[in-house]
Image: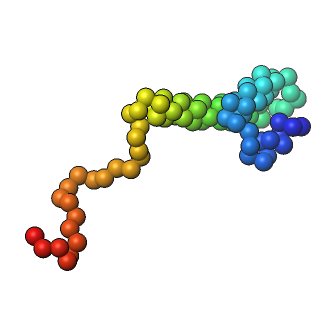
């Protein structure tokens, strides 16, 4: 019950959510759901696991870049002529 309370409040970590989805996927064949429902749940659990895995991977890449010094800022500017205010004389 505590797992679902954490999930409901939105405070469950991505790693914990992946573990819960893995447990649900392993438990799914032993439930009494019809075959069509099991298929839908299996697809849903698989997609959620893939999405969470992707987010965890992106966080890891961002963290490694930040720790190595490559990732200084997320602010980028476009290439082009520098902007001059209308009151400035050329």
Image position, residue 48 (x, y; %): 65, 36
Which residue is farthest bottom? Answer: 87
Drawn side of residue 79 relative to residue 59, left or right: left
Image position, residue 71 (x, y; %): 41, 37
> Which of 7/73 is in front?
73
- Residue 37 visible here: yes
At a point 72% along the width and 33% down the height, the residue shown is: 17
At a point 77% along the width and 42% down the height, the residue shown is: 7
Q: How is the image coloured?
A: rainbow
At a point 84% along the width and 32% down the height, the residue shown is: 33
At a point 44% along the width and 32% down the height, the residue shown is: 65
Image position, residue 59 (x, y; %): 54, 35
Report the quarter where the C terminus lies. Answer: bottom left
Report the quarter where the N terminus lies. Answer: top right
- Residue 50 visible here: no
> Which of 44/56 is in front?
56
Drawn side of residue 80 relative to residue 50, left or right: left
Image position, residue 52 (x, y; %): 62, 34
Q: Quadrant of residue 34?
A: top right
Q: How many marks?
A: 0
Q: Quadrant of residue 16?
A: top right
């Amino acid at each position: 019950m505590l797992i679902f309370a954490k999930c409901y409040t939105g405070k469950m970590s991505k790693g914990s959510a992946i573990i819960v989805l893995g447990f649900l996927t392993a438990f799914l064949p032993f439930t009494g759901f019809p075959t069509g429902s099991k298929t839908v749940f299996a697809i849903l659990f698989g997609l959620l696991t893939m999405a969470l895995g992707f987010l965890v991977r992106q966080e890891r890449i961002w963290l490694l870049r930040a720790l190595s010094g490559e990732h200084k800022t997320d602010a980028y500017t476009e290439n082009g002529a520098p902007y001059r205010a209308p009151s400035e004389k050329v």
